Structures are given as structure tokens and as C-alpha cells.
Amino acid sequence: MNSEIINALKNAKMTTYCLDEDQIISQSEWIERAYTKCKSLAVFFNTKFYILHNDTFNGAAFYKPKFIALNFGVFDLSQKMAHIITNYLVHDITPNIKPNKNPNRKAYYDIFFSLPNMVDANKKTIKENSLANNYYEQIASIFTLFTMFHELGHINHNHGARNINHFCDGFDSSTSSLSSENALDSQTREVICDLYAFECLVKSHVLPMKKELSYNKEEFIKYLTDHLTFISLYFYFLSPNLNNDGYKHASHPPTAFRIFSIYKYFQSDETINISKIEKELIISSSSENLRKILINIFSDSASNNWHTWFTDSELAAWHNEIYNRTPNWYLFEK
Ligand SMILES: [Zn+2]
């Protein structure tokens, strides 16, 4: 790692200690595969790629010099989350998580991050059951690849070239205090990259699955419902708080907004080629599945109503603002 990269990481307040490839791939067979996939994507997009020695779920795209940095936690926590959710869906096993006392804080957060390094992908409950294996793969892949594709979206759209002071697009919004105009611009970039990541996952996972299940539409609808449930879950886990005060000055949209824009995009998508009614059904079932997971696994009582903290008109007004700004940040010529 050269000094330019070390300085860029320091300026973004990220750790500067990178893991060696050997340290990464020795962690588990799944991490080796996920890392190899991300590395090949970085090569394809002609960008450098580093894994930082940090356990949290975080990453960033840098423009000068051009590189993507993911924390090791992206891989590790994706794997743990896949393990927990799979055990619940297939074996009805739930971890012992105490009910959430703080209504603004998501119940999973502390437990999730303090899980011991025990989640063993080779555990019998998952390895010897093909349904469990499929869920595990689907969840862990969505959590890791959505992150990677999102960061590649920033690079691909050359977001850094718009502003000389804008050297990086980070992952978390917790410390932001932007003017409302700058916040809307930043949130527009984030939404574009979310939709880009969604589109990449459709190409890499959903369309091949459609081909594979061409004889069984019901199975495919179920797969899509799961896919949307796990993407919603991913967004739910991105930040520690449910308290969305101040989103008008934050660099990243609140969870409910990000899920809303994915749903909107899914409704208008023409590549998956299913009916409007089927899409509606998939969206409502995946919302319900998300609620069940948050209640049953994470005892998160706030999950019953968190997505209604914003009114429909607030969501529509925000979406309109973002939509109007989209041409400024979309498909910028390299
Ligand atoms: Zn971003």
C-alpha cells in the first residue's frame, strides 16, 4: 500500500492496516470464495481493492487514487448473519437475544457485533442440508456483494470527478452534518449505487435462477421474495439507530427510504419479466418476512412499525427530490 492510499484512508478516518490475502482466505471456505469474487470484480472494473483490518460492516470508494476498501467485518458479519438467519429459517433455531430496551437502537446491533468468532460454515446443521446451504449462500452473498457492487457503482459512475474536494464515498452516515442541498446530492449518489448494486445482483443471481427454475414459477417467485427480504434485512442492519431525525443533513438516506427506492425500482424493472401483481405480492410478502425475522430472531419490538415512521407523503417528496437529481449523478462519462 503506497503513502497516497494510506493518506486517503487516514483522511476518511478508516484504519490503515490491510490484511494480507493469506490472512483473509484462511478464515473460511466461504470467505475465500467471496473475497476471490470481489477481487475479480475489482480487476474487471480496473480499480485497486483492499481489505482493512476492522471488524465492523463498512467500506468506501475512493477516487484519487482510485480504490475500494472493505472492512474485514463485511465478510465476517455477512457470514455470521447468514448462519443465524439460515438456522432460524430451516431449523427454527434462534439465538438467545434479550428484548430491546432502547426504542431508538436496533436490538441486533450489540449482539451481532459481539458474537464470538465461532460461526462455523461447516457446522452440520447447514452443511448437510441443501436447503440450508442455499439460504446460507444467498444471504451471505447478498450481504457481501451488495456492498461491493454499491462501491463499484460509485467508481463506475465516477462520482468523485464532480467535486475536487470529494475524495471518497463512505458507507455510514452517522457523523454527517451537511447542508440540505449537499445531503440531497449525496443521498442521490447513494441511491444510484444501491440501484446499481440491485441491478448487478439481478444479473448475477436472479436471472440465472430464473433460467434454472424455468419449469417452476412458484419456486422462482419464492426465490425472489427471499431475495428482496434479505436485501431489506441488509439495509436494516446498515446503521445502529432507528432514530431518523436529521436525515435531511445526512450523507446516506434512512433505511426505510433505501428500501423504498429498491421496491420502486423493482416495480419498474423489465428484465425479470413477471407481472405487476406478482411484484406487489413479492413486495408485501418480503416486508412481512422481514418483520418476522426481526421479531422472532432479534426480539426487535420496534420492527413492527419502524417503516411507518415516515408518512407516504414524506417518502414521495424525498423520492421526487432524489429522482430530479438523478441525471446529475447517473452514467457520468468516464
Ligand atoms: Zn455509497
Image: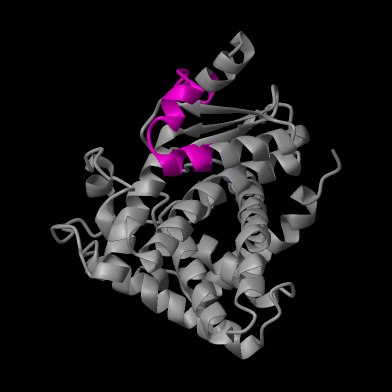
The stretch drawn in magenta includes residue 21: yes
Q: Is residue 317 left or right of residue 270?
A: left
Color style of the picture: one colour
Q: Quadrant of ligand 1?
A: top right
Residue 232 counted in the magenta span: no
Relative image position of residue 92 (x, y in whole percent): 23, 70
Coordinates of residue 235 in the picture (x, y in percent): 46, 57
Question: Could you tell whether 244 is left or right of 8 in the image?
Answer: left
User: Is 10 on the left or on the right of 131, as rendered?
Assistant: right
Tell me if residue 124 comes above or below residue 73 in the rendering. Answer: below
Any part of residue 35 in sight: yes
Q: Quadrant of the N terminus?
A: top right
- Taking the spot 54% from the left edge, 68% from the top edge, the residue there is 260
Q: Quadrant of the C terminus?
A: top right
Q: Determine the residue positioned at 73% across, 56% down.
A: 325
In the rendered image, the vertical position of residue 176 relative to residue 2, given as above or below:
below
Quarter occupied by residue 124: bottom left
Residue farthest along the front direction in this orientation: 128
Q: Could you tell me residue 30's position as x and y percent?
A: 44, 44
Q: Left of 115 or right of it: where is 274?
A: right
Please report the residue visible at 74 percent of the width from the left and 32 percent of the height from the top.
46
Seen from the viewer's position, the closer of residues 113 and 164 is: 113
Compared with 167, 82 (above or below) is: below
Outermost top residue: 3
Q: Quadrant of residue 316?
A: bottom right
Question: Between 178 and 130, which is closer to the camera in this rendering?
Answer: 130
Give the residue furthest to the bottom. 277
Front position in the image: 293 or 38: 38
Q: Which residues are magenta?
A: 11-35
Residue shown at 45% from the left, 56% from the top: 137
Q: Is residue 242 in sight in this rendering? A: no
